[in-house]
Amino acid sequence: MKEQLIMQRIVKKIKSLGLELGFNHIGISDLNLDHAKKPYQDWIKSNFQGDMSYLKRHSDLKFNPQKLVPKTIRIISARIDYFPNDKNTKLALKNKDQAYISRYALGRDYHKVIRAKLKKLSSKIKDEITNYPVEFRVFTDSAPVLEVELAEKSGLGWRGKHTLLINKDHGSWFFLGEIFINLPLPIDKKLTNHCGTCSACIDICPTKAIIAPYKLDARKCISYLTIEHKGSIPVEYRKAIGNRVYGCDDCQLICPWNKYSKVTNEHDFMIRNNLHKISLLDSFKISKDKFDEIFNGSAILRLGYERWLRNIAIGLGNAKKSKAILAELKKRLPDATPMLQEHINWAIKEQTRKN
């Protein structure tokens, strides 16, 4: 009983410290993920993961956190909002000449920001607890961790039909991070699902990647195609991609719960280099050195220059017909890699296609 009271006080302190460090919500869960095993295995068997072979390769670790981090007893899940102060998000998506970048990537690379905050929180926890040999390890979208399931178990929200986590009071524009810890902390209650009969996210998906409630075929998803996929983007999805050159936010923009989302207070997630209003044509003119400079410290840097141009070429093919665009596409063509040439040629065809 005494240890239970001590752990309750520790949890209260952890949550307080988390808020002080800029997290918006902290929750605690146990390690039991059996409920998610069959749906995940069925998803893998259907090859919905596409080229992301690591999702299959490391699946055993996902369902056994102690194999990933021995001595783990509890998992602390943390939420931090990222939506930038941009009132023109929907207008940017409709502007065919503008490069639309997913809102999460407009600021600094979230991996670095959240990891640093989790390390600070972990150190403060260790400093506060002198009677226990505290051991921990932090993660944020960087290891075989079932982030959404753990966050759902810890009361941070519920999994929406688009497969992202939704919070009743804060929508879904947020990142998640975890601390695997060896303390028997009291766990939080799982919240109920409030998607109801709504199918807005399913209906609006440009490539129909949400094939059923809570089931995503990543091979069709624009976020997967423009970020994770390394090869040529299938022709059948290029028109639907429109001007989305890095990720896709349609399912979040339409979600009714996001009317409750909050603009981030985190400086590192503020818009950098005017990426919320960069034109497709200007994006295509960027040199390799300029690309490295602009996206230094950004999640977009990992995309690489070739795939950046590949995505922009598709956007230019979908843009309004323009002599300037056509000239720039032809100018880039001779020195392009074979994969990029294929996308540029597609864009030239679209730009010269008769209505």
Image (cartoon, rainbow, N blue to C red):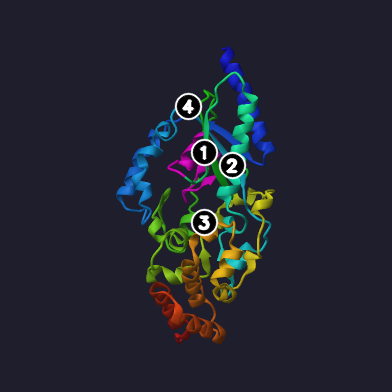
What label sits on residue 251 in the rendered view?
A: 3
Three-letter amino acid code of the residue under disc 4? Ile
Decide which of tag 3 and tag 1 comes sooner along the chain.
1
Residue 168 shows up from this direction: no
- The residue that label 1 is drawn on is 151
Q: Residue furthest front?
A: 289
Decide which of tag 4 and tag 3 comes sooner along the chain.
4
Is 144 one of the magenta-colored residues?
Answer: yes
Cα–Cα span, label 2 and label 3? 19 Å
Query: Where residue 135 sits in the image (x, y, percent)?
Result: 52, 28
- The residue that label 4 is drawn on is 73
Q: Residue at x 62, y 67 (%)?
A: 91
Three-letter amino acid code of the residue under disc 2? Arg
Query: Where residue 309 sits in the image (x, y, percent)?
Result: 49, 71
Cα–Cα span, label 2 and label 1? 8 Å
Chain part drawn in magenta: 143-168
Cα–Cα span, label 1 and label 4? 15 Å
Q: Which of the pair 255/123 is nearer the observer?
A: 123
Q: Residue at x 60, y 43 (%)?
A: 116
Q: Residue furthest left?
A: 45
Decide which of tag 2 and tag 4 comes sooner along the chain.
4
Cα–Cα span, label 4 and label 3? 35 Å
Image quarter hosting the N terminus = top right
